[in-house]
Image (cartoon, rainbow, N blue to C red):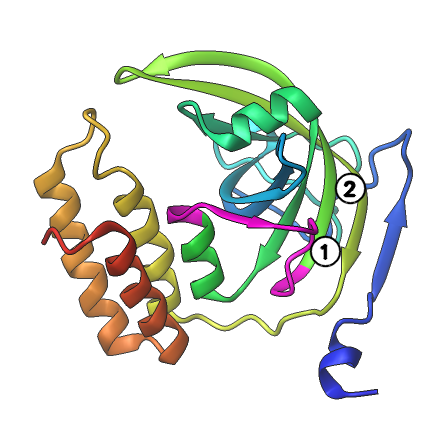
Amino acid sequence: MTGSERDREPMDIDGDPNGDVGWPARLRGVTESIVTTLGPNDRWNCAALGLLANGGHENGETGNGDGTTAESGSLVTARTWGRTRTRRNFREEGKGYVQFVRDPVVFTEAALSIREESTPILDAATAWVRVDVERIDAGESGDTQWVEWALRPREKRVHSRVIPTIDRGHGAVIEATVAASRLDVPAYDTEELCDRLAYFEGVVERCGGPREREAFSHLIELVGRQW
């Protein structure tokens, strides 16, 4: 068995079609993830999805307090903004696969481009959770419609545990994808967003590694340099 094959062996498998199996890690605040949802073309669309712990309550978090497994029944929600593929697929299929990744290039592609796969689980996922989704609220902000969904875990797998490190370049890439995704949204000030992107680019250059720099270059290819 090769090293890569060994890394992909599941360390944790849990599934119960009739019950909540919990989350593979403690969640707090907003946790960025990638979700894959099945479209009408039978391909899995990849998109960034922010997970709001404890139903979005301030300072809410899920978990047993040991940082390993979220409590069954802890409410995690997510919002889709606009008429996205994720919103359509949530509505039509009522499910998806939430995935936790560390690769900034993969995250940037999911956040800013149309990426579809033949299978739901990405190679870059260190853990994934199959969720049932239920629409619980909807509204409008700045002429953009949003829908809030409750995410209920039904199956999970953990492929690897990651030793936590703090990398400012990695964080800057994630924040840059958020700013870049809002460039064409009328409710946001374009000049302010461009200032943020210029700052994040500087952080990536100073503090990021090769994958962070590649991710930011890919971001520029996808949205164009407007700053």
Residue situated in front as seen by the camera: 135 or 218? 218
Report which residue position mark 1 lands on. Answer: 66
Q: Amino acid at mark 1?
A: Asp
Residue 131 or residue 51, whichever sits in front: 131
Q: Which residues are magenta?
A: 111-126
55 relative to 220, above or below: above
Sequence-wise first label, 1 or 2: 2
Coordinates of residue 127 in the picture (x, y in percent): 69, 58
Q: Nearer the viewer, residue 91 or 79?
A: 91
> What residue is shown with label 2?
22
Q: Is residue 112 magenta?
A: yes
User: x, y percentage for residue 142?
Assistant: 26, 18
Residue 162: which quarter of the image?
A: bottom right
Quote the CA–CA distance across marks 1 and 2.
14 Å
Identify which amino acid the numbered label 2 is placed on. Gly
Q: Residues within 10 Å of mark 1 (few under 14, many from 20)?
A: few
Query: Which residue occupies 37% across, 61% down?
Result: 171
Q: Quadrant of the N terminus?
A: bottom right
